[in-house]
Amino acid sequence: MKRREFIEKTAAGTALLSLGLAPLCSAAPRVSLSSFETDDIKHLTILHTNDVHSHIDPFPADDPRNPNKGGVSRRAALIESIRKENPNVLLLDAGDIFQGTPYFNYYGGELEFKLMSMMKYDASTIGNHDFDNGLDGLYAQMPHASFEFINSNYDFKNTIMNGLVKPYKIFNKDGIKIGVFGLGIELDGLVDKKNYKETVYNNPVEIAQDMTQLLKKEEKCDLIICLSHLGYKYKEDDSKICDLKLAELTQDIDLIIGGHTHTFLDKPTIVKNKAGENVLVNQVGCYGINLGRIDFYFDKSKSHTNEAKSIIV
């Protein structure tokens, strides 16, 4: 079967796992792999978060909406257990790491970056709230991050951040080549100009087309992921670019991991791109309550199928 046929023939499965007061439940059943020779399968696991907003501790037991949910220690334990299950893991974040609790007010993002580094995040894009202490504040915390920052539509060349953010990054897991690029929301009108200074915002659709051309045609990536802080969708402004529109207007993106709108999805949304092929669009809410998981299975020809679940931390 051809690469894209798998994603069209297999709906993304979903299950909820619960941590905290309840024991860890069993994972969702695997998708059917009857089209594969099992010995030839390569298994890649994508784990992802977005809009954690400095929530280090779990919500208290008396919280009216999210009692006992979230918390870095639980997320770290869950990530560790998944890595023991499958060594081929990419751990990604879709931005807005900063702002939301006194931890950020006091430490300025140092604690967030250090903890993400300890959990061995591979990459994050930049959200609008990551500018809340200005470019100087973000720059000051960069030495505490051992993971990559990826954004391709913010031009930092005339700022202190020049050279610290990559437009894309290629990861190799068990012979599978994964290209990851990042996109950020327009800052004008959302972030105080003094906080982003000479940062230039470029059209995310045009940049995405450039990135996919490079990653697919030149770099020959087997899987292309967009880390997006554009937002899932906007009812009030039909012209505003969002993840669903990005998927429709581009091609060769396999997965969009989103942020900004704090959208809780039980399973990824499947969108047809401009070539009529399927794109997975996922987002797991906010505050570290959920950990997204999408498993890809590759055959010898590097065609792939997938399954997905949202894990309640």
Image (cartoon, rainbow, N blue to C red):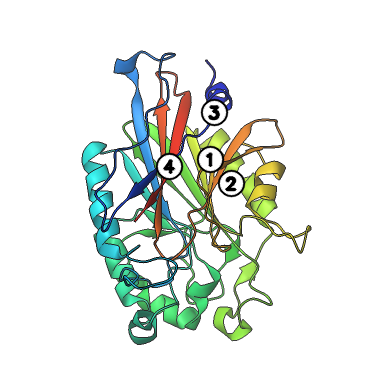
Q: Which residue is mark 3?
A: 7
- Assign a secondary structure to mark 4: strand
User: Mark 3 and mark 2 in contact (Cβ < 8 Å)?
Assistant: no
Residue 303 can be seen, yes or no: yes
Q: Amino acid at mark 4?
A: Lys
Labels 2 and 4: the sequence-earlier one: 2
Tell me residue 5's x, y (percent): 57, 22
User: Mark 2 and mark 1 in contact (Cβ < 8 Å)?
Assistant: yes
User: Mark 1 and mark 4 in contact (Cβ < 8 Å)?
Assistant: no
Of 87 and 286, nearer the camera is 286
Of 213 and 302, nearer the camera is 302
Label 2 vs label 3, nearer the camera: 3
Of 269 and 163, nearer the camera is 269
Tell me residue 82's x, y (percent): 27, 43
Q: Quadrant of residue 137?
A: bottom left
Structural distance between the alpha carbons of marks 2 and 4: 27 Å
Structural distance between the alpha carbons of marks 4 and 3: 16 Å
Labels 3 and 1: the sequence-earlier one: 3
Q: Residues within 10 Å of mark 2 (few under 14, many from 20)?
A: many
